[in-house]
Amino acid sequence: MGLDGDDVERILRDLETLKDTRARIDNKISVLESKLRQIQQKPCPQQNGSVCSGSCPATSAIVPGSSHGLSADMVYRYSRHLLLPSFGVQGQSKLSKSSILVVGAGGLGAPALLYLAASGVGCLGIVDHDVVELNNMHRQVIHTEAYIGQPKVKSAAAACRAMNSTIQIVEYEEALRTSNALDIMSKYDIVIDATDNAPSRYMINDCCVLLGKPLVSGAALGLEGQLTVYNYKGGLCYRCLFPTPPPTTACQRCSDSGVLGVVPGVIGCLQALEAIKIASSVGEPLSGRMLLFDALSARIRMVKIRGRSLQCEVCGEGAAFTQQHFKDFDYEKFTQSPLATTPLKLNLLSAESRISSKEYEDKLVSGEAHILVDVRPDYHYKIVSIPESLNIPLSSLEARLPEVSSALKEEEERKGKNSGTGASLYVICRRGNDSQRAVQYLHKMGFTTAKDIVGGLESWAHDVDPNFPMY
Ligand SMILES: [Zn+2]
């Protein structure tokens, strides 16, 4: 009647295989559909390499006697757009001839891409070098479980094609770099920045200024988001507003920030909206103003932001920033943060002040007298922790040093009577960065034997306890 372990394992294996097959079939279908469409379409007169210039919506017969260039299928598909007096056939016709590049197929890019595809943008470019992961699912609603482990670009393109097979979709499965940005971005009318890091923001902005492209910029973190349009018809650019990058210390902590899934969803939708307005020349783009969204209080505020700065190094009066400058510019150095999302690995301590998670396991098994201090924030600790560890967040370590002393004393009394060497002090965090900072501080405060567990809980889950949930 009941299932034994072998059955469960077999089912899991079968599921894995089936999901894999489904993803591959999905992919094949969308590639074939796309091929078929290309064969059926008339050749695009302005086709430039592999990328559509935007002037080639899939044309079944154009409605006779009309000047808008929309086919009968398009009239039906976009009829609710056409019935909007302020948008109408002119808006749709312009949109269908436009090309929009979305950089990043993550939390912001997901809703932006879906709406842009649905609304009939002529050509949609997607840039991303990441793969789909389970912990993307709560916000990156364009991806499905079947695509876990596969490139986000493939997943996003398939979702867009499934929704609207009549538009051109171009996939760039690569990171945007100074070496490829000019070439890629020059092929589009409008750029959407849906990335989440400082070097990309500056790089995309500078490239848009050089190429004269409007930039729809959005950001979402925690429970807040913001949105604006840069470089639109002589308006300011990102550098006019932020000539120098923000300090990076906060971002280098290994406690990554959380985000409520729907918050980037809201901002991404608004990015799509701004891009559609610009592409169709309808309404008033959000240039010179910034929209601030506060999810908790359900407030949207609009603040006026400065105009173009004459001193701006990229778009200002005497700015001599050329395409060659751009290609040579080191955005990672400028912002002191990496372009890729690989977490930073600090190396602050000498080898004798560090032990591996395996070595710590040995100490646990041997019953060595010790305490383990977990320096993550308490909301991290509440997710998961090693039993018997003591949670003292790095930010309150200074104030709570007496707790470390008394825990050590207690442990010595309990276990260490015959060892004579006292109890050891180990420190752990999520990835092994904050724990090193903590050990550095503890050494300074006289706890000279404190040691850091290399790689933190991530390496504990990887090397010691595969059932330990990571987040
Ligand atoms: Zn500027």
Image: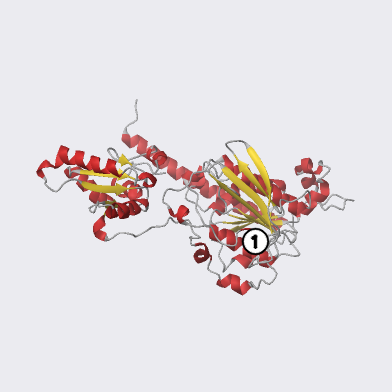
Image vertical order of residue 325 relative to residue 42, above or below? below
How many residues crowd mark 1 within 10 Å: few (<14), some (14–19), many (20+)?
Answer: many
Judged from this view, the residue extending furthest toward the top is: 1
Rendering quarter of residue 180: bottom right
Judged from this view, the residue extending furthest toward the left is: 418
Quarter holding the C terminus is top left
Depth check: give the residue in front, 364 or 316.
316
Residue that badge 1 annotates:
240
Depth check: give the residue in front, 162 or 273.
273
Q: Position of residue 84 (x, y in %)?
A: 81, 41
Is residue 324 visible in this depiction of the protein?
A: yes
Give the SS element for disc 1: helix
The amino acid beneath tag 1 is: Cys
Q: Position of residue 4 (x, y in %)?
A: 32, 32
Quarter holding the N terminus is top left
Residue at 61% in and 61% down: 204
Q: Position of residue 462 (x, y in %)?
A: 33, 49
Is residue 166 visible in this depiction of the protein?
A: no
Image vertical order of residue 296 relative to residue 202, above or below? above
Q: Position of residue 295 (x, y in %)?
A: 59, 38
Give the colouring mode of the picture.
secondary structure
Does the numbered disc 1 mark a residue whose Cβ is under 8 Å from ligand 1? Answer: yes
- 125 horizontally vs 173: left or right: right
